Amino acid sequence: MILATGATGTVGSTVIDALSGSDDRVRVATRDVEAARAELPGVDDYVTFDFAHPETWGPTLAGVDRLFLVRPPVVGVDPIREFVDAAARVGVGHVVYLSVLGAEKNPLLPHRRIERRIESSGVRHTFLRASFFMQNLVENHRRDIVEHDEVFVPAGAGETSFVDARDVGAAAALALTEPGHAGRAYDLTGPEALTYSEVADVFTEVLGRRITYADPSLLAFARRMRSRGTPLPFVVVMLGIYTTARLGLAGRVTRDVETVIGREPIDLREFVADHAGSFRR
Ligand SMILES: NC(=O)c1ccc[n+]([C@@H]2O[C@H](COP(=O)([O-])OP(=O)(O)OC[C@H]3O[C@@H](n4cnc5c(N)ncnc54)[C@H](OP(=O)(O)O)[C@@H]3O)[C@@H](O)[C@H]2O)c1
């Protein structure tokens, strides 16, 4: 049985999708079984699960031999590390963990602290160190594009190697079901690194209307996000991510998506075309 945490999230939902044709039994771990059933129909099993409620962990892990592990952005490192220990105790044989590009260089990063606990658990593992998801452009920045015809992020002229979460999900499904991925860490990026000016140009071309890159200051960005009710901790995380891009540290491109899934990664043009309906006025 494969257990998917974060199954209703951006990457997890694509993992479930990619696993739908496989012979393996799949269990969705969620805080809301009815909502997950509606969102992800046809999965073998659904279980009520919360990292903050260890009493839900036993039934969640019963009979599981492989685990797709996501740290929800709102959950601290400690419950995740304790969940890794619990998975090791009950004999889970392989953990595929959704990490972040460059995690290995920063021992203080939550993702690296979780990776290290997985390494020391003795359980076979695969780390998927993903670059910035294209899906953030829909989930966090759609309104600026729809209402103002602008990409409004404080990333200066820095490049980002955007990856489509569907490719990350496809890689996760293969790492969970194929031999040969244990002990590996994959740096999952898209096919190219783009500045946000270039991102705006792709939107212009695909949507057929002029989209510009606003390049706001950090303060102007934080103000706009807060005025929309975005929680402060999330604004702070975004400021960190866009500052990393501004400093030129988010543009590394690798071939690991192709290595794992056997085809070229999805590029931004295809992503925008697939989501064009969300960006129309
Ligand atoms: N965004 C990026 O560009 C990017 C890039 C690289 C890596 N990452 C990493 O990817 C991870 C997030 O993945 P995502 O974007 O796919 O997730 P997401 O869309 O933010 O979804 C969060 C998931 O976590 C679950 N969840 C929330 N609170 C929970 C709790 N207390 N207990 C159990 N489950 C809980 C939710 O499930 P239910 O509501 O069904 O319970 C949901 O499925 C983070 O670790 C992030 O750092 C993100």
Image (cartoon, helix red, strand yellow):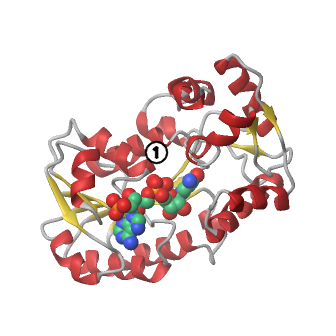
Is residue 214 in sight in this rendering? yes
Residue 61 percent coordinates (x, y):
20, 70
181 sits to left or right of 202: left
Is residue 128 in sight in this rendering? no
Rendered-image quadrant of the N terminus: bottom left
Residue drawn where x is 49% and y is 78% of the image: 76
Q: In the rendered image, which residue does mark 1 sit on?
A: 168
* Residue 147 placement: quadrant: top right
Rendered-image quadrant of the C terminus: top right
The kind of residue on which mark 1 rests is Val
93 sits to left or right of 81: left
Work out whether residue 144 or residue 27 is closer to the camera in this orientation and state it: 144
128 sits to left or right of 142: left
Label 1 CB-ligand 1 distance < 8 A: yes
Residue drawn where x is 62% and y is 33% of the image: 191
Residue 89 percent coordinates (x, y):
23, 81
Residue 271 percent coordinates (x, y):
55, 30
Secondary structure beneath label 1: helix
Characterize the local packing of mark 1: few (<14), some (14-19) or many (20 or more) Cα atoms within 10 angstroms: many
Quadrant of ligand 1: it is: bottom left
125 sits to left or right of 33: right
Work out whether residue 128 or residue 246 is closer to the camera in this orientation and state it: 246
| Vertical arrangement, residue 119 with respect to residue 226, above or below | below
Residue 273 percent coordinates (x, y):
56, 23
